[in-house]
Image (cartoon, rainbow, N blue to C red):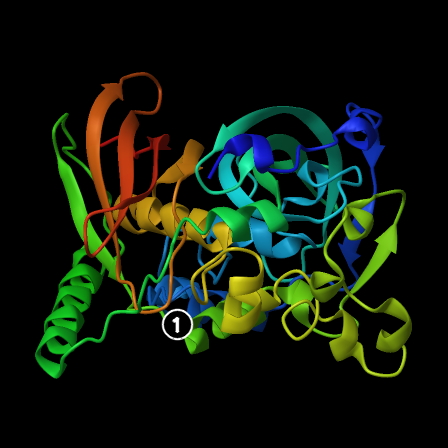
Amino acid sequence: MSKSSLTPLDTTDVDRWIGIPLGGGQLKESVHINDIRRWAQGMQNPNPICFDEKYAADSVHGELIAPQSFTICTDVGHGATPAIQGNIPGQHMLFGGDEWWFFGPRIRPGDTIRQERMLYDYRVTDTKFAGPTMFSRGDTTYIQQTGEVVAKQRSTSIRYLVENARELNLFGDDEEKEWSDEELEKIEQEKADYYHSYLDLGHDKRLFVKVGDKLPRRPIGPHTLLTFATEWRSYTMTVWGSSYEHGVSSTQDSGWTPEMSRDPEGAKIDPANADGLYKGASRGHAQPRWARHIGMPRGYGYGATMGAWVLDYLTNWSGEHGFVVHSDVKYRFPALTGDLTYLDGEVTNITHGETPIAHVRVTMTTHEGAVMAAGDAEVALPAE
């Protein structure tokens, strides 16, 4: 197909939003301990420090606190709200990556987190998936009730025209893999081996790290519509009535196709009409018909969850005495139903100072070796 036949992107309305402080959704209630437990469950991360209060009481924290990945669960919109500003008729979006800076405060039950947002920049380029495609970056700052900044997230949104993606049909007739009982049994053993890697560390410090060390491989999946729906429901914002809109934002008027738009008037009668998963921009994740509508071959996972998998992977490895100070991961390929995801990491450098910093290269691949995501992180490790 000639790219000249594809519809160009009109970014005119996006320009006026750059550098403008934004509103958007805010959660009504403070963090509850069961929000944290549900998060660990939805992220398929059975580290007892995330859900077992007796185990957590013996940790360096002395109580059950949220993992660093939970930060995004305190936001309404996965941190992508500021990167989806301006109306582009007929558009949809996918996650293109997340960069995180963490500043030290940990999120505990009872904390109230609010967000400040701003569209940072964007660029338009051609992609095999949808032709003219916008990569827009937006910043979300997470602030505790004390005024302390917990973290800053720079999220990249991939905005494209649905009609172009459907015409290019990049995925073709891509079919979901069927796993044999023997293969599934092997995967479960791989998961158990990974879980033991942090259970064996327990409450001890991660010491004697050196350049070239490989992090234990983490398998996740195979992914199903059920796992994607469970992920969605682990985000507090997806609970009916859990949030309110504050300030000015154009996210819900970004040019979604009618089939992927929410119905705010209908939601006054039935909240499912603006639920996101049942009706709205996220319905393609767990409803194959709507996945195909936006150019995907079948149900697919959430970019925000991929980011959480990376943060959990790093914090599970570093242990309760470690702390991710920065990560910058680009997403290239989504998790699809039937696929298995692997996370691998390697220590590429160690910076010695008051606190040793391990520089870690993280790669996320499918069971067939396709790269889903890759990036670098800096993890503070305990001194001896």
Looking at the image, residue 4 sits to the left or right of residue 59; the answer is right
161 relative to 173, above or below: above
Report x, y in % for residue 141: 67, 36
Within 10 Å of the Cα at label 1, are there few (<14), some (14-19), or many (20+) other Cα atoms?
few
Whether residue 32 appears in this view of the structure is yes
15 relative to 182, above or below: above
Q: Quadrant of residue 43?
A: bottom left
Residue in the picture at 30% in, 34% down: 381
Q: Quadrant of residue 325?
A: top left
Q: Which residue is mark 1?
A: 54
Report x, y in % for residue 270: 82, 82
52 relative to 83, above or below: below
Looking at the image, residue 305 sits to the left or right of residue 360; the answer is right
Report x, y in % for residue 103: 55, 32
Q: Quadrant of residue 326?
A: top left
Give 188 or 323, whichever is nearer the viewer.
188
Q: Callout 1: helix, strand or loop?
A: helix
Give 287 or 217, whichever is nearer the viewer.
287
Give 147 or 47, whichever is nearer the viewer.
47
Looking at the image, residue 294 sits to the left or right of residue 359; the answer is right
Looking at the image, residue 290 sits to the left or right of residue 69; the answer is right
Residue in the picture at 42% in, 35% down: 330
Report x, y in % for residue 199: 21, 62
Residue in the picture at 61% in, 41% down: 160
Residue in the picture at 23% in, 55% down: 218
Residue type pointed to by label 1: Lys
Instruction: Give the quadrant of the C terminus.
Output: top left
